[in-house]
Image: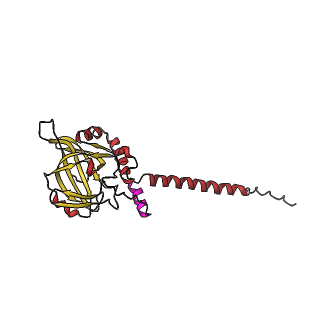
Amino acid sequence: MSRPNEELPPSRPAYFWWLLANALALCFAILSWAVCLNVFGSPELPRNYELLSKVGRAPVLHRYTVLDAPNGAGLAPKELYRKYFGYSEEQLAKANGLLMRNYLINFGEPQLLTYVEGDFQIGPIRKLSPTDFLDPGIVLRAQALVKPDDFSKPVPYPVLIEYVFPTLQADSAAWFSAGDILSVRKNPNCAAVIHVSKIANGDEPTLLLTVVPIAYGPYQVGNLGSFQIEPPVKVRPGCRFPLIRD
């Protein structure tokens, strides 16, 4: 007695594989698009910046002058303190990411741009190294000096800046001396805030701002001479801030 032929399972129609291939391609396209948006849209993240550098697409910092620097608010030490000191740690982290991104994209979001103004007494000074935010260059820390009233002498105020000079002439650091007064104005310095910290300065909590001048060209140091400030070719968003630590 012959066995009946077993029926073969029905084969999938050809369009099933066509639909599957197209669905996979669509998923890959959406994933690639999302990754690209994240990488190009958030260059302040260290891994994104390094990836962009490897493929030759890292942000290029524009060489502004005093005449074409983007418009931003110029704030004195008391105003800076009121603006930033009340931030929580979470708010500081978010603000620092936005400030760094804005710097890298040449201040595409001008409402985030803040320039420092005021007189500051210089403290520690050093050359920048390959582990810093940028190099070559100079960084100095300075204490804000503020008059309590129109009839008093300026006294220290709980705001510090670390002023970063991107320059090939890093030996010019010797022209700055601790105790000298650094006068910072929106015009001509255009010293933009790129990072905000809060530190303990003695017994008093203090605001510490990292600032970079974005009006490039010669910088005059008293009667000693001038050095050239130029936009850095590459920066390191993942470096540790502040750049000068006790």
Q: How many numbered badges does the structure rendering display?
A: 0
Whole-percent x, y for residue 16 in the image: 70, 55
Res. 128 visible in picture: no
Write the residue at 42% across / 52% down. Answer: 42
Write the residue at 41% across / 54% down. Answer: 43
Residue 72 is a magenta residue:
no
- The span picked out in magenta is 45-63
Q: How is the image coloured?
A: secondary structure
Res. 114 visible in picture: yes
175, 57: nearer the viewer: 175
Residue sitting farthest toward the left: 152
- Indicate whether 240 appears above or below 147: below
26, 116: nearer the viewer: 116
Whole-percent x, y for residue 178 in the image: 14, 53
Write the residue at 19% across / 49% down. Answer: 183
Whole-percent x, y for residue 81 in the image: 25, 40
